[in-house]
Amino acid sequence: MAKKHLRWIGHTIRMPEHHLPRQVLYSQLMGAKRSAGGQKRRFKDYTRDLLKRANIPLTNLALNRSAWQVTCASVVSQIHQTNQDRRSERRIQRHRGGWYLLASGFPCSICGRMCGSRIGLYP
């Protein structure tokens, strides 16, 4: 999804200024406020976060199409690798066992497994 998003942003920035998508990308509503609380993520919010996370200088780089494509490809692969690492880290933590067993527990005399309470450990 980030790949298509970045491609569209680059395409929009290279458009002439009188085209509507470019005007919408750079425009803001006068006097509009976002209400307090959880907001829906707008296209503009996602774009700003994506560019900030990737450290991409927006306008100068997007005007050079080939450099923009190379940058987008590297950013997408970096995001993919980061997400993959995060998923594998979560999987390891999930399969490692409960955190509550590390603090205190009662070992089973038969299998050696740590239990949260003594109930059921008596033969």
Image (cartoon, grey):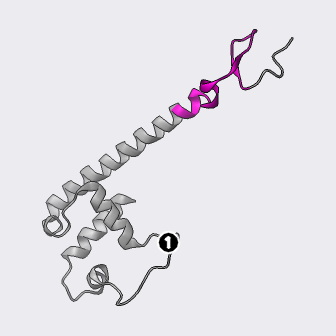
| 119 falls in the magenta region | no
Q: Is residue 13 left or right of residue 39?
A: left
Residue at 30 percent of width and 47 percent of height: 78
- Crowdedness near tag 1: few (<14), some (14–19) or many (≥20) residues, C-alpha within 10 Å: few
Residue at 40% in and 59% down: 1
Residue 22 locus on image (x, y percent): 26, 81
Image spot of residue 18 (x, y percent) = 21, 89
Closer to the camera, 54 or 31?
31
Query: What span is in magenta?
Result: 93-116
Rendered location of residue 17, percent (x, y): 19, 85
The quarter holding residue 84 reads: top left
Secondary element at image label 1: loop
Report the amino acid beneath label 1: Gln
- Percent from the top left, x then y, of residue 110? 76, 9
Is residue 109 in the magenta section? yes
Query: Residue under circle 1?
Result: 39
Is residue 46 shown left or right of residue 9? right
- On screen, residue 94 above or below 32: above
Residue, far front:
104
